[in-house]
Image (cartoon, rainbow, N blue to C red):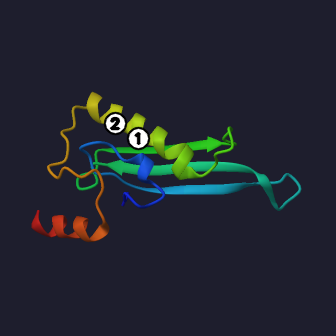
Amino acid sequence: MVSENGTGKNAMIPHYRVAGKTATLHKVKAGGGYDENKYVSAFAGFSPASNPRVVTVVIIDEPSEGKYFGGLVAAPIFSKVTERALQLLRISPDKQSSSWVNHENLEEQGKSS
């Protein structure tokens, strides 16, 4: 789950809970091994976390401007794209005001449904 203290905090969407995972990878060299200076950054997630309606995967091949971590590069794009999709699909915000949950909270919500 996206946490205010985690690497995916830039994926948060106001009034919606988000679940997802950041990724930062070194690219493979043509002759084998990994290129220490070339990256792929990603964030994959869904929202609302308690009743998923939108799944978004953002993959950035060789991000520029010195930033390459998935939480810094791909997560903000996830947030903007997914927020707009939720609006276009007229998916109501979560009843809980926080935009993040942890797995314990999600499990408790599942038991009460």
Kindly identify the residue that appears in the image at 47 percent across and 41 percent down.
Answer: 76
Q: Tell which residue pokes out farthest to the left in this image.
A: 112
Marks 2/1 in contact by CB < 8 Å: the verdict is yes
Mark 2 lies on a secondary structure that is helix
Q: Is residue 54 above or below residue 23?
A: above
How crowded pointer 2 is (Cα within 10 Å; few <14, some 14-19, many 20+) is rated as: many
- The alpha-carbon separation of the residues under discs 2 and 1 comes to 6 Å
Instruction: State the residue at coordinates (68%, 38%).
Output: 65
- Mark 1 belongs to which amino acid? Ser
Residue situated furthest right in the rendering: 31
**What residue is rendered at 56% in x and 56% in y?**
23
Relative to 81, say whether 29 is above or below: below
Q: In which quarter of the image is residue 28?
A: bottom right
11 relative to 88, above or below: below
Residue corresponding to mark 1: 79
Label 1, secondary structure: give it. helix
Where residue 96 appears, x then y in whole percent? 17, 53
Residue at left offset 18%, top offset 39%? 92
Residue at the limit of the structure toward the top, as seen here: 88
- The x and y percentages for residue 72 are 54, 47
Instruction: Give the position of the N terminus as an image quadrant.
Output: bottom left
Residue 105 circle label: none
Residue to which mark 2 is pinned: 83
Q: How many labels does the image show?
A: 2
